[in-house]
């Protein structure tokens, strides 16, 4: 149910919205990789018993939910829905992805302190690099969101 007037986008607004969507799609790929790596770490015999592992997995799941929420809101804009509620929801979803990304980094370091196996530590390094990629994408998404919201 729409909570505001129908939104008709200009060609420029559609282009900017599409760029924002594409940035979230690139982010979704990074998050899938991140979830996969953390799942691998969670199941690895050298790290599976580390304290905080379940919280780490939960935090990265919340990052994924944040991306899904952003993408859902963008789809609704493409469907010509527009409302203050939708704009606030987009901001919240982006905030969830950003905040839980920070939590994921903190929890990863807590887990890493308890790991001594070489293979598991290599996984931790791959996760760190993927988290850096995620930070870059989140910044890009924020820039694209600001460009769109400033145009509408």
Image (cartoon, helix red, strand yellow):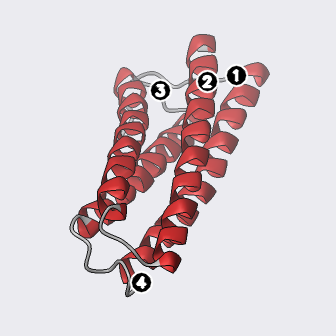
Q: Nearer the viewer, residue 103 or 151?
A: 103
Above-or-below relation of 150 to 75: above
Which tag is nearer the camera, tag 4 or tag 2?
4
Earlier residue among tags 3 and 4: 4
Q: Are dots 3 and 4 in contact, CB under 8 Å? A: no
Earlier residue among tags 1 and 2: 1
Give SS at disc 2.
helix
Spatial CA span between label 3 and label 4: 46 Å
Please identify the quarter of the rendering in which residue 101 is found.
top left
Q: Which mark is residue 82?
A: 3
Q: Which residue is mark 4?
A: 44
Q: Quadrant of the N terminus?
A: top left
Which tag is nearer the camera, tag 3 or tag 1?
1
Give SS at disc 4.
loop
Q: Which residue is mark 2?
A: 143
Residue, far top: 150
Q: Identify the residue at horizontal 46%, vertical 51% (top origin).
A: 68
Percent position (x, y) of residue 85? 34, 27
Above-or-below relation of 17 to 132: above
Earlier residue among tags 4 and 2: 4
Count neighbours of disc 2 (C-alpha within 10 A) and say few if under 14, some if 14 to 19, many if 20 or more.
Answer: some
Q: Quadrant of the C terminus?
A: top right
Residue 47 appears left or right of 9 = left
Q: Nearer the viewer, residue 62 or 85?
A: 62
Q: Identify the residue at horizontal 39%, vertical 57% (top origin).
A: 60
Residue, far left: 51
Earlier residue among tags 2 and 3: 3
């Amino acid at each position: 149910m729409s909570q505001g007037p129908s939104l008709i986008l200009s060609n420029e607004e559609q282009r900017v919205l599409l760029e924002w969507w594409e940035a979230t799609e690139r982010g979704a790929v990074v998050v899938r990789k991140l979830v996969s790596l953390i799942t691998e770490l969670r199941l690895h015999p050298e790290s599976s018993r580390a304290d905080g592992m379940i919280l780490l997995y939960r935090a990265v799941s919340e990052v994924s939910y944040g991306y899904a929420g952003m993408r859902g809101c963008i789809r609704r804009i493409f469907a010509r829905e527009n409302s203050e509620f939708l704009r606030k929801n987009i901001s919240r979803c982006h905030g969830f992805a950003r905040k839980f990304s920070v939590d994921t980094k903190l929890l990863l370091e807590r887990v890493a302190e308890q790991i001594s196996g070489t293979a598991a530590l290599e996984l931790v390094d791959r996760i760190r690099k993927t988290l850096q990629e995620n930070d870059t994408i989140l910044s890009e998404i924020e820039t694209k969101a600001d460009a769109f919201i400033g145009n509408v």
